[in-house]
Image (tube, helix red, strand yellow):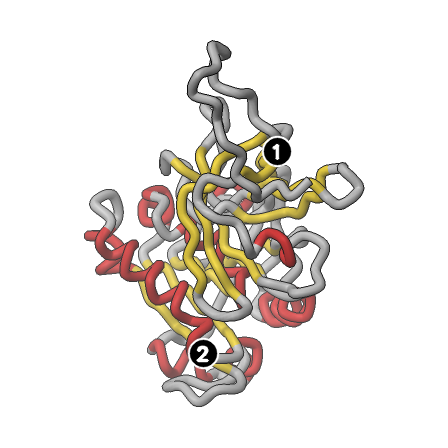
Amino acid sequence: MDMTEQRPVNEASAQPARAPALPDAQTVTEVQHYTDRLFRFRVTRPRTLRFRSGEFVMIGLMGDNGKPLLRAYSIACPAWDEELEFYSIKVQDGPLTSKLQHIQPGDEIILRPKPVGTLVHDALLPGNRIWFFSTGTGIAPFASLLREPETYENYDQVILTHTCREVAELKYGEELVQKTLEDPLVGEEAAQKLVYYPTTTREQSPKMGRITDLLRDGTVFRDLGIDGMDAGHDRAMVCGSMGLNTDMKEILEGFGLREGANSEPAEYVVEKAFVG
């Protein structure tokens, strides 16, 4: 059955509102497409759901075999938001995103309300400056953390880097930064502490290059007027491709930072569940 199909409600029925057609169903409230590869959507939030900014949940649709087809998606909104937002790639032959990209407001998706993840403040030791390193849709958890008051309570400087192939793919990040600056909860502090550093790898833009290369040759530090990184002051979170994760671990550990976890906080964390 096509789970995006809208089924009419029989107004004459004496039955109460129909039960969700999907297990753990939530209703899509908003959809915005950025490119032929990227889109975001918002859904209703389960009343009982509690999560820490930066965590992810399993979401999806029914597969052709009648079983739930689920993938890990970072929640791209802060813990205080009344709805939930997600940022997704579109893979035309992908088992899930080939269908998910066609959702419309009013449709239902499956959302398993068991948030987990390593990109949370509890997994880091106290520091002065935090770096959010992202590629592609890996920016999603930082869309949550950038609008989380605790981020600005914990750090004197917050640096968001976002690397994409083309300029149009940076739009979500640009909108995110603008929303953060306009946010009544964090906007004033963000205006003083937030630094946005977007780069592209294919299409010409004001700053070209992979963030890993720009870190290795010192370009990032020169651009931002920062004297490198050290374990005494800097903290970092990484979310992107497996290649980014591997390279960033090597770079960060080269600066003396150690990988942390919920059970053992340290200087940096990587979201291993993310693929995209």
Residue 11 x %, y %: 43, 21
Residue of label 1: 112
Give the x, y percent position of residue 196: 35, 68
Q: Is residue 217 above or below residue 226?
A: below
Q: Is 200 or 90 nearer to us in this picture?
A: 90
* Circle nearer the N terminus (1, 2): 1
Q: Quadrant of the N terminus?
A: top right
Which kind of residue does numbered mark 1 sit on?
Arg
- Callout 2 environment at 10 Å: few (<14), some (14 to 19), or many (20+)? many
Residue 69 image-quadrant placement: top right
Quadrant assignment, res 34: bottom left
Say left or right for 215 vs 241: left
- Residue 249 against residue 24 in the figure, above or below: below
Q: Residue at x 40, y 37 (%)?
A: 83
Q: Which residue is mark 2?
A: 199
Q: Which label is found at residue 101?
A: none
